[in-house]
Amino acid sequence: MNPIGIFGGTFDPIHFGHLRLAEEMAEALCLVSVRFIPAGTPPHRTRPRTDAHLRLEMVRLAIAGNPHFALDDREVGLPRLSYTVETLTSLRAEVGPDQPLCLLLGADAFLGLTSWHRWQDLFTLAHIAVAHRPGFPQSTWKDAMPEALRAELERRMAHAQDLTSCAAGLIVTRPITALDISATHIRDTLRTARSPRYLLPNAVLDYIQSNHLYLPEN
């Protein structure tokens, strides 16, 4: 049974870096689909600049037309902090014990995994697939990892084809196209009255402009 990909984030705003990561990981790992899950109030960063319902709509516009992408709004309505382990627990209850789930992370997020709430429980709920830039060898990761995470990587490291053998518990890594795009840069570009066109889908940019998001500085 092929895995379902889970891709969370603030998406403030969503951009081509997010979309390309999801597309390449879906192809490389033979994912059934990728569920985009915009965060409500994430615990690891400052509160998103934009209301959850606006970020949700930007994701909806960005993934429209891709039959392998789906939008999941389970976090945006929470009246409290949203934790990935709780989101995966909810998803696991829906799909059952046998369906493989695959949490998609960038390398930076993976290196910070030990700071996440109940981080070791993530492995009982899903596989973890780490997308990294080309030429970023595993030896570089290990040097930057906390010892506890390094031990989990060494114990759980697998290949893409192994993800169908069980529902959770493995780690795979995959190089993807390096796109140096960040939501912070896009917000800063908009606030300084410059154009972020070609960094994010036109539909998302049109939505930002029509809703007066990330307004220029006075």
Image (cartoon, grey):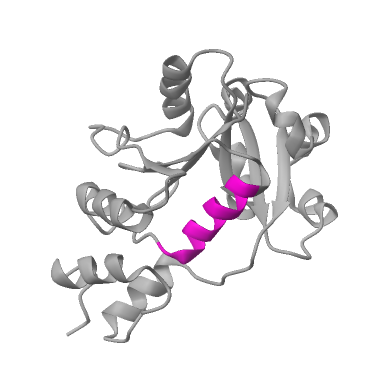
Q: Does the magenta run of residues contain 93?
A: no
Query: Relative to residue 87, is residue 49 drawn left or right?
Result: left
Residue 33 visible (yes or no)? yes
On the question of residue 111 being in view, the answer is: no
State left or right for residue 193 relative to residue 100: left
Q: Main secondary structure of the magenta part?
A: helix
| Left-right relation of 184 to 47 | right
- Say if 145 sits above or below 82 in the image: below
Q: Nearer the viewer, residue 129 or 149?
A: 129
Residue 86 percent location from the top left of the image:
43, 25
Query: Which x, y percent locates residue 10?
Result: 38, 51
The residue sitting at 41% across, 65% down in the picture is 183
Query: Taking 43 as reference, is 90 above or below it?
Result: above
**Quarter of the figure with residue 154:** top right
Above/below status of 22 relative to 182: above
Question: Whole-percent x and y of residue 147?
Answer: 77, 38
Where does the magenta region start and end?
15-27
User: Percent x, y for residue 193?
Assistant: 26, 86
Q: Residue at x 55, y 13 (%)?
A: 97
Left or right for 97, reference 87: right
Indicate the quadrant where residue 91 lies.
top left
The quarter of the image holding the N terminus is top right
Q: Residue at x 79, y 35 (%)?
A: 157
- Residue 66 or residue 185, whichever sits in front: 66
Specify the quadrant of the image occupied by residue 151.
top right
The C terminus is located in which quarter? bottom left
Outermost residue to the left:
211
Is residue 18 inside the magenta stretch? yes
